Image: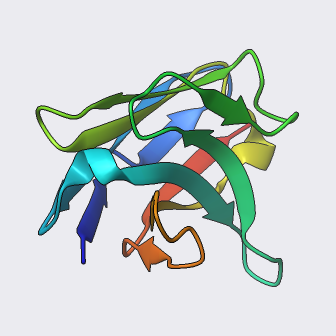
Amino acid sequence: QVQLVESGGGLVQAGGSLRLSCAASGSTFSSYVIGWYRQVPGKQRELVATISSDGGRTNYADSVKGRFTISRDNAKNTVFLQMNSLKPEDTAVYYCNAKPVYATYINYWGQGTQVTVSS
């Protein structure tokens, strides 16, 4: 089992940047695929980006390609989401997700961090 804690959210003007962090504890971090998701009230949670257990493969939603970068530091049990050129439509609660590489049907979630982009 793994515990996830997100941080780094806040209020930023359109065009600005934020860096989210997801700190993990409780299990072998390098055995997990990590994803960032986001959700706005009344809508389904949507995938933003994922990164493989070794950091070698990444995947992004079309809406954030070229603006967001996901990375991980397995030595520090942390995943990052660098968000640049932020838009008001990026406003959401951002959640960190972990799936064991041997059982990707299992999901662990953090508590979320609010990102608000003002126009």
- Residue 91 in percent (x, y) is at 67, 52
Is 119 in front, or is 39?
39
Residue drawn at (60%, 77%) of the image:
105
**Numbered disc total:** 0
Residue drawn at (73%, 80%) of the image:
41
Q: Quadrant of the N terminus?
A: bottom left
Query: Residue 64 falls in which quadrant of the image?
Result: top right
- Residue 22 visible in this rendered orientation of the protein: no
Is 62 in front, or is 17?
62
Is 9 in front, or is 60?
60
Residue at the bottom extreme, as displayed? 42
Query: Residue 32 falls in which quadrant of the image?
Result: bottom left
97 shown above or below 52: below
Is 105 in front, or is 13?
105
Residue drawn at (68%, 28%) of the image:
14
Residue 55 lies left or right of residue 41; in this view the side is: left
25 shown above or below 71: below
Q: Quadrant of the C terminus?
A: top right
Residue at the front extreme, as displayed? 102
Query: Residue 49 falls in which quadrant of the image?
Result: top right
Residue at the right extreme, as displayed? 62
- Residue 117 visible in this rendered orientation of the protein: yes
- Residue 70 in percent (x, y) is at 51, 30
- Residue 85 in percent (x, y) is at 67, 19
Residue drawn at (50%, 76%) of the image:
107
- Residue 50 in percent (x, y) is at 59, 43
